[in-house]
């Protein structure tokens, strides 16, 4: 498998005046352009919740590459509900010096660095957690317990405390994760939320925990600290959150202090289709963003399906979104904004003869490790080798996680 190096093409100055113009957020913070590295589970923490040198270097490289903001995916405030043993954990026992270094080096050259507030809920990694969500799930190959009312009520304060720590350590903002089937997304989805109390039933009740969390986080951090939200346009599952309901959530977030609304979709529940591996071409959620634009004054970002500069330009130029989120494109070219602004074409996405389950995630995750180690020579990694490396590393980190967080 080979990936092309950037090559020169025609530079469209008029388009650059849109994609490469600053964006002022509602709290007054300014993004230097409209290109954001969206949240990914980079799996680069040390297995004990703390940043590694490789992870710090990766986010420094992305900042040096010209982006407006970068979002670190799945940062936990509570080690009991991680998505993977490579997640960061920003709790009272965290290595604050390492987090400060990450915040400083990941925000060079005018870039923002935000933490995505994570809680995997029913999707918590089974070897190191006890999965728990809005309602009990008892599938043959998937089980989760139901949260008590007291456990639900603790969520907003817990995430707000993590956001407060992030602000104190020098990060520029947080993103509240209400997408992709993780905890707040589970509450929004009628497929996974069958509660009959104040947090279940109609969408106005199912969005209650998200709204309470947004309000708690906004209250806990300085006014110039960015509070973003990632929201599913749809779960892409029969019986899940629909676009009509998601638009009600958009309207419900108006006036709550959100600085940027990141629109995505899909879920990581076992057996569900992955948005990131769709066969369709082009951005996925622009139509939803266009409808959301009529309901809110919050700046909008769409994540999913952007692979070419022309697609990103068109989305911003149309006014449907204010910014575009890309993830895997940044793994192929960590200097993607510089590449685009120079009139170059970024490397093509890899294609594999066969695609084992989880293979694409493993390949891109191990490629992030390569970037963080400044190893540009590993572009030809076999996908099966990537799976082996990825799984072996997680196995080692499970034991580290258990030892570090045994009391939890």
Image (cartoon, rainbow, N blue to C red):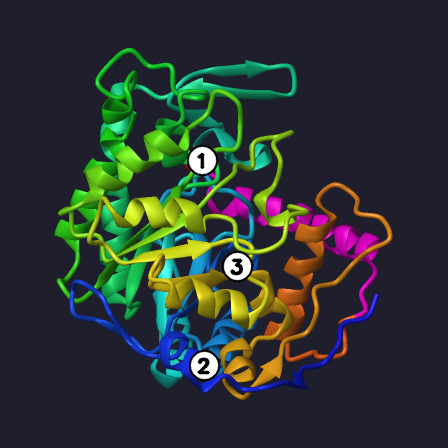
User: Could you give the CA–CA distance between mark 3 and mark 2, rounded to whole angstroms?
Assistant: 24 Å
Foreground tag (1 vs 3): 1
Q: Mark 3 and 2 residues: CB-CB less than 8 Å, in contact?
A: no
Looking at the rendered image, the quarter that the C terminus falls into is: top left
Foreground tag (3 vs 2): 2
Specify whether residue 118 is in view. Answer: no
Give the residue at x 37% y 49%. Answer: 289
Foreground tag (2 vs 1): 1
In the rendered image, which quarter is residue 386 located in? Answer: bottom right
**Looking at the picture, how far across and down is residue 96, in whole percent?**
35, 65
Mark 1 lies on residue: 234
Q: Is residue 15 above or below residue 185?
A: below
The crowd level at tag 2 (other Cα within 10 Å; few <14, some 14-19, many 20+) is: many
**Looking at the picture, how far across and down is residue 379, in whole percent?**
76, 71
- State the SS at label 2: loop
User: Could you give the CA–CA distance between mark 2 and mark 1, rounded to whole angstroms?
Assistant: 31 Å
Which range of residues does the magenta coloring cover? 380-407
Specify whether residue 222 is in view. Answer: yes
Residue 96 is one of the magenta-drawn residues: no
* Number of marks present in the image shown: 3
**Looking at the picture, how far across and down is residue 189, in whole percent?**
40, 26
Give the residue at x 44% y 22%. Answer: 192
Mark 3 lies on residue: 45
Q: Is residue 304 above or below residue 34?
A: above
Mark 2 lies on residue: 66
Residue 391 is one of the magenta-drawn residues: yes
Looking at the rendered image, the quarter that the N terminus falls into is: bottom right
- State the SS at label 3: loop
The mark found on residue 332 in the picture is: none
Foreground residue, 16 or 50?
Answer: 16
Q: Is residue 161 above or below residue 243?
A: below
Q: Mark 1 and 3 residues: CB-CB less than 8 Å, in contact?
A: no
């Amino acid at each position: 498998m080979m990936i092309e190096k950037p090559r020169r093409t025609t530079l469209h100055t008029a388009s650059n005046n849109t994609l490469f113009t600053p964006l002022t957020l509602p709290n007054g913070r300014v993004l230097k352009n409209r290109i954001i590295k969206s949240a990914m589970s980079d799996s680069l923490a040390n297995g004990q919740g703390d940043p590694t040198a490789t992870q710090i270097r990766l986010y420094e490289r992305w900042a040096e590459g010209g982006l407006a903001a970068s979002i670190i995916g799945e940062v936990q405030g509570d080690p009991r509900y991680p998505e993977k043993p490579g997640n960061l954990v920003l709790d009272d026992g965290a290595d604050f010096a390492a987090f400060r270094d990450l915040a400083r080096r990941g925000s060079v050259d005018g870039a923002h660095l935000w933490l995505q507030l994570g809680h995997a809920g029913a999707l918590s990694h089974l070897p190191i957690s006890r999965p728990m969500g809005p309602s009990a799930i008892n599938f043959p190959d998937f089980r989760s317990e139901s949260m008590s009312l007291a456990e639900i009520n603790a969520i907003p304060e817990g995430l707000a405390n993590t956001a407060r720590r992030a602000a104190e350590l020098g990060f520029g903002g947080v993103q509240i994760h209400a997408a992709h089937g993780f905890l707040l997304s589970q509450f929004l989805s009628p497929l996974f939320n069958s509660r009959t109390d104040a947090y279940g039933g109609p969408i106005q009740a199912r969005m209650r925990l998200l709204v309470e969390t947004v309000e708690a986080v906004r209250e806990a951090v300085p006014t110039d600290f960015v509070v973003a939200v990632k929201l599913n346009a749809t779960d892409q599952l029969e019986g899940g959150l629909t676009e009509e309901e998601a638009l009600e959530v958009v309207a419900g977030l108006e006036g709550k202090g959100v600085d940027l609304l990141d629109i995505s979709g899909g879920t990581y529940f076992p057996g569900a289709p992955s948005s990131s591996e769709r066969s369709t071409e082009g951005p996925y959620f622009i139509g939803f963003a266009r409808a959301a634009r009529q309901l809110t004054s919050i700046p909008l970002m769409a994540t999913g399906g952007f692979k070419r500069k022309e697609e990103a330009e068109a989305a911003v130029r149309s006014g449907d979104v204010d910014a575009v989120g890309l993830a895997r494109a940044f793994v192929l070219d960590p200097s993607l904004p510089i590449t685009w602004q120079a009139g170059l074409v970024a490397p093509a996405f890899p294609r594999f003869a066969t695609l084992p389950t989880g293979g694409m995630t493993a390949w891109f995750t191990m490629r992030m490790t390569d970037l963080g180690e400044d190893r540009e020579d590993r572009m030809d990694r076999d996908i099966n080798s990537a799976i082996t490396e990825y799984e072996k590393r997680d196995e080692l980190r499970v034991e580290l996680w258990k030892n570090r967080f045994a009391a939890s």
